[in-house]
Image (tube, grey):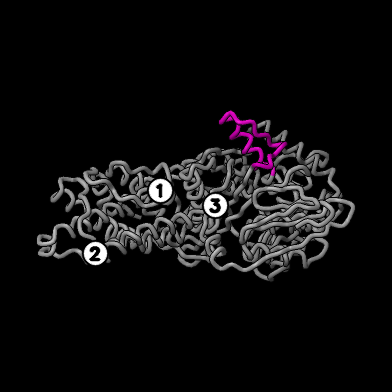
Amino acid sequence: MILSGSGKVRFDLGEISVEAGDVVLFHPFEAHVLRNDGNEDLDFVDVYWRDGEAALDAAAKTTAPRGPIFVFSTPPTPNGDLHLGHLSGPYFGADVYTRFLRMKGVEAYHLTGSDDYQSYVATRADADQSTPAKVARYYAHEIRATLALFDCEVHSFQPTMGDDGYGEFQAACFRRLLSSTAIDLRQSPALFDAVTGHYLYEPDVSGLCPDCGGSAGGNICEECGAPNLCHDLGAARSRQSAEAPLVGSVRRPELALDRCYDNIDRHLRASGVPLRILDLFARLRRRGNFSVPITHPSDWGLPAEGFPGQVIWVWPEMAFGFLYNIQALGRLLGRDWKAEMPGNDWQIVHFFGFDNSFYHALLYPALYAEVFSHWTPRIHYHVNEFYLLDGKKFSTSCRHAVWGKEILSPKTVDVVRLHLGLTRPEDERTDFTLDALRRTENEVFQGIWLNWLDALNQEIKQDFAGRVPDAGDWSPVDRAFFARIEIYRAAMERAYSDEGFSVRRAAAQVCDFVRDCVIYRRAQDYAAARRFYPARNRTSLALQTTAAAILAPTLAPLMPRFARTLARGIDGVSTETWPRSVQRLAPGTRFDLGPVLVFYAKSAILI
């Protein structure tokens, strides 16, 4: 209740102006901030009360976000193809999330691209005795092919090389950034190879993280997520020679992050980031004054205007590249989305690995505030940890990987997606093994899922000519199972929704549900009772066909190919829209799962 003065209230859906006499009511858990934007005191009274029932009701609801929603998976570095470590993280997560939103009728798009100007591309070109441009083009093509094999739907794939408009937009953003009060031109310490004299950063140097003391690469520590400036690494080692690197200096523009902390803090509070990112921000603030260069001496990258021999650092470039990708998508759709004028109605969702947290959640909001003062970004973040291969991190450079193309085909992609879902590294690191993947295929998908569907399909075919029977007598067990189907549907909706998004939880829930279906079926599988009490048997089969039918749409974000094949065998079932509730199949509905059972009948994981 505003007593005097005026201000603005920012909440989940935007911002409103308030003045004396206004009353603003919020639902439980609705984040909001009141800010005084006038020259006099803003007096208000804040009233709250505890209502357990209302709180539980609010916590149980899932909100359908308003579009347009731009879901970004981190643009992959085209220094190699995608392996299962890549696929399990941002690309799988963004694909599942976008598919679900579109089923809910939300205008949502999955965007990514190839991060062509990464320094790692130049490193790979040196190793291959090629050029960075050739390496980037080749692997960008391979990456797109692997995403297609993974059934990962991408609505805009934006390369950063070869587009004049992209370079012009980046140059304009760089000029605007240089005029910011948070940018200083400094002659600051930098690291150089003792033998070649080359400037060292990113893949060219490693050492001990100045924040956690663990092993770190140049500019970022993959273990704790903290940035470094290379010269502050402990026991620094150059990739180019065995001699200890030397500290020199370079004149370049730097972003004083400490001047941006208030903007970053406001953004993080509004976006609801995971606590681990808040911890990263708190650790960064403990450093006090901290500046990061926005250019680096290099011959690979977009030229930094006014700084000969230097290029725009690829991470600030990526921040503005996201906006250019939205504009490029708009051109395809006939929409007037302008990168230089991002809209306050845009909602952005980022999927990335924790090692990129500093860039996405801390650096990018700071850059946006300096370049687009009119824009209040609405960004949500979904972060995954590292996926391990036999106990060690997947690695492109070390060739420690299972590559997507080695294992993906139309017949295997659903099992791979199911297994990656069950083992996806969301809040903790998880491990992939080929033996575990084969167990998921043979013991879970083949041994439980397909065996249940096959037994159900045979009984419907033999006793009811491939048509769903009408239910008869209902026992308490039948009523409980029917309720369980709706509980499952609602649980899957929450696992796909922003409030509780978890591919791992969704995959576990569908496996638990199919096991419940098998248990329910076994409890009804008594031949004499089926003959003597046919009305009870009809109810059991009607409920099982309903359970099979609800699998198709609820699996569509997770396993789209299998879901579509399953839906084709049951009349009236669609994977295009999300079911608002469970509806029993009408008696007489065609039920023929022969095609799906034949296609997936034999084990297909061969490597």
Q: Is residue 565 left or right of residue 491?
A: left
Q: Quadrant of the C terminus?
A: bottom left
Q: Residue 229, position in %: x, y?
A: 75, 59
Quadrant occupied by the N terminus: bottom right
Dividing the picture into quadrants, the one containing residue 325 is top right
| Disc 3/disc 1 C-alpha distance (Å) | 15 Å
The residue at which mark 3 appears reads as 63
Identify the residue at horizontal 73%, vertical 57% (top origin).
33
Direction from residue 438 to residue 459 in the image, left or right: left
Q: Are marks 2 and 3 in contact (CB under 8 Å)?
A: no
Residue furthest out toward the right: 39
Secondary structure, mark 3, is loop
Query: Mark 2 falls on what kind of element?
Result: loop
Answer above or below: position of 209 versus 140: below
Q: Which mark is residue 403?
A: none
Which residue is tagged 2?
A: 475
- Seen from the viewer's position, the closer of residues 412 and 142 is 412
Q: Mark 1 — residue?
A: 579
Q: Amino acid at mark 1?
A: Pro
Q: Amino acid at mark 2?
A: Ser
Image-quadrant location for residue 247? bottom right
Q: Residue furthest bottom?
A: 213
Question: Is residue 323 shown in magenta?
Answer: yes
